[in-house]
Image (spheres, helix red, strand yellow):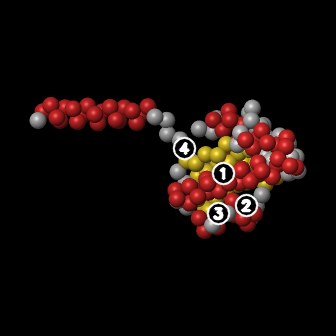
Amino acid sequence: MKTGRIIAALLLLALLLAACGAEAKRPYTTADAQTLLDAGAFNGEMQRVEGAFVTMVYGIDQGSLTDYVCYQAMDTAVSADEVTVLILADEDAAKAAEAACRERVESQIENCRSYAPAALPDLEAAVIDRVGNTVLLAVGDPERLPEAVKGLK
């Protein structure tokens, strides 16, 4: 009986120690978009996108979106650069938004093949990440963007 308790206590201790060593990701915030813009991870000028455009482009139910920020390249004929942070009501809505972001990038890749092939490397290296009820989509300079995103954590 004592041996069983000791083994159980050791297993619990091992789990606790493992959890302490794991680095927890923090949820994204709308301020993270500005941090990425300031990091120079995008090629060219970006403009903030407001209103229903965001919910339409991502196919997100307005009621599930609690906050967001979206910047896109001013000249979308030559650049697919974008940074979007979506904060949703719950994790299920965030999972749906993450899938919508993946679909958007795939759609952009198909569209850019014919009219903006120079944007393909940026799109193919897009960062899409979900933490809890937040989603980040970033399309930018594939040399700078991954490091800039890593700096958010």
Q: Is residue 73 visible?
A: no
- C-alpha separation, residue under disc 2 versus residue under disc 4: 26 Å
The one nearer the camera, 38 or 131, is 131
* Residue 127 x %, y %: 67, 42
Secondary element at image label 2: helix
Callout 2 crowding tier (Cα within 10 Å): few <14, some 14–19, many ≥20: few
CB within 8 Å, label 1 to label 4: no
Secondary element at image label 3: loop
Q: Earlier in the sequence, mark 2 or mark 1?
A: 2
Residue displayed at 75% across by 32% down = 143
Residue type, label 1: Arg
Q: Is residue 126 visible?
A: yes
Q: Earlier in the sequence, mark 4 or mark 3?
A: 4
Q: Quadrant of the N terminus?
A: top left
Secondary element at image label 4: loop
Q: Earlier in the sequence, mark 1 or mark 4?
A: 4
The one nearer the camera, 88 or 110, is 110
* Residue 34 x %, y %: 72, 45
Residue type, label 4: Arg
**Badge nearest the viewer, 2 or 4:** 2
Q: Residue under label 4, please give it.
A: 26
- C-alpha separation, residue under disc 4 versus residue under disc 3: 23 Å
Residue 57's mark? 2
Total label count?
4
- C-alpha separation, residue under disc 2 versus residue under disc 1: 12 Å
Residue type, label 2: Val
